[in-house]
Image (spheres, rainbow, N blue to C red):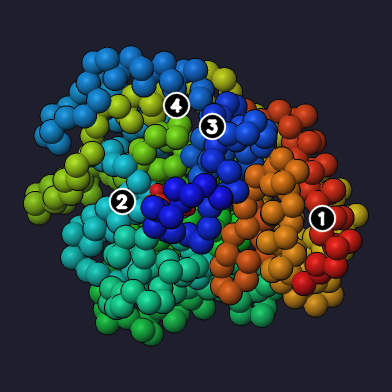
Amino acid sequence: MDERERFLIRYAGGFAPEPIARAEGAWLETESGKRVLDFTSGQICSTLGHNHPRVNGAIRQTLDRVSHLNSWMLSEPVLALAERLAGLFPAGLDRVLLLSTGSESTEVGLKMAKLYSGRFEVAGLTRSFHGLLAGIASVNYSMAHQGYGPLLPGAFAIPAPYAYRCPVKHCDGACDCTCLEIGFDLVDQASVGSLCAFIAEPILSTGGIIVPPDGYFRRARELCDERGMLLVLDEAQTGFGRVGTMFAFEHDGVVPDVVAVSKTLGGGLPLAATVTSDAIEDDCFAKGFIHVTSHVSDPLPAAAGLAVLEAIEEDGLVEQSARLGEYLLARLRELQTEHEQIGDVRGRGLLVGLELVEDRETRAPANALGAAMTQECYERGLSMNIVRSGGSANCLRLAPPLIVTDEEIDLAVEIMDASLRAVVGAGVRS
Ligand SMILES: Cc1ncc(COP(=O)(O)O)c(C=O)c1O
């Protein structure tokens, strides 16, 4: 441990064993020269890999011109990014607010939904994560509620479509959306008549890579429309190619009322956006909508975001993510045949989860095994992380950069195989 760690507030448990000196593509290098394959893309942000030349070039060029401005001043990178983003989304998602973090983009989504509808009740999915600002954290059901006092009134939970452990004990392996119907029924019964929005991740990542069944969001759209609720989708992790389509919502062919994008937009720089319709923007503007932050519409991160979008398009990274995702899933399913402890493998594109269990019969979550395996993998040169949700910490999340190669995937699977054998051999099973 570096002595200087004692000057830092510990914001999420401990820190990695050694500081990172540099990073490139899918690789990290520690101060002592150890190389680690980065299968979390930093904090799921470095979609293009680390230090992408196009992103670095755009940052350098913008630094020499202007990096930060007063919030009412616009610049070429901001205008160009807004136009490009609006062009990527379907009609009905026409207006863009450029922000810094995922928490902000979801918070703004809900603020606009409230102002537009004049109502305040919001439903979210159990096991969801949308950020840690006080407002949006009220509809986070995966963590961080205990110890911080009251949440916003009017926040409701709908059971997540977690087919491997059906929340209503109804399905097994394939969700039939009963949880969604029951969830809206419960919301109706709890509501004081002020239903405003339903917010969801199209694939729940922090909650354990939970992939809703086909048609789930079409049904959610109907249920929202019946109640006059807005559909707000949080594409922080799934947007811009990560799941093999430009946006995850394309899978069901729905058009949400509001989309929040963040992590995967900035190429590692803090950049996020809330996107909505002309009608919602006009209405909110007329009602005096205000959301001014220090770094709203900053040129520097906007230039990085523009470079990310150009690279994704020109290098065919959406298609690459779909192909490599299939390959990664196939390799992990092979691994599953070798290890009783791998209960489930699931995901879409390059957002993949692997759930560890004591045995496949009881499906008891193997939390200690998950922690030991993550550590063993890191020591052997693979960084990935455990996602913690609903009291368990047994789902390994793999989200490599979209520029990862087949060989790097093979290497990661080899390291996982050897690590799992080693920790199970050492007696860690539960
Ligand atoms: C789906 C989702 N939404 C929002 C956030 C919050 O983003 P940030 O940490 O940039 O505030 C995260 C972060 O993990 C996330 O996964």
Compare marks 2 and 4 and give the one earlier in the sequence. Answer: 2
Residue receiving disc 1: 420
The numbered disc on residue 104 is 2
* Rendered residue at 85%/55% (across/down): 422
Dividing the image into 4 quarters, which one contains the C terminus? bottom right
What whole-number distance in Å separates the C-alpha atoms at marks 1 and 4? Answer: 37 Å
Residue receiving disc 4: 309
Occupied quadrant, residue 304 = top left
- Left or right: residue 403 versus residue 96 is right
What whole-number distance in Å separates the C-alpha atoms at marks 1 and 3? Answer: 28 Å
* Rendered residue at 56%/72% (across/down): 390
Q: Nearer the viewer, mark 4 or mark 3?
A: 3
Judged from the image, the secondary structure of the residue bearing numbered disc 2 is helix
Front residue of this view, candidates 48 and 238: 48
Judged from the image, the secondary structure of the residue bearing numbered disc 4 is helix
* Rendered residue at 55%/37% (across/down): 20
What whole-number distance in Å separates the C-alpha atoms at marks 4 and 3? Answer: 27 Å
x then y, percent, for residue 85: 36, 32
The numbered disc on residue 21 is 3
Please tell me how crowded label 4 is: few (under 14), some (14-19), or many (20+) other residues with Cα within 10 Å.
many
- Left or right: residue 359 versus residue 401 is right
Q: Nearer the viewer, mark 2 or mark 4?
A: 2
x then y, percent, for residue 413: 79, 43
Residues tagged 4 and 3 counted as in contact (Cβ below 8 A): no
- Above or below: residue 78 compared with residue 38: above
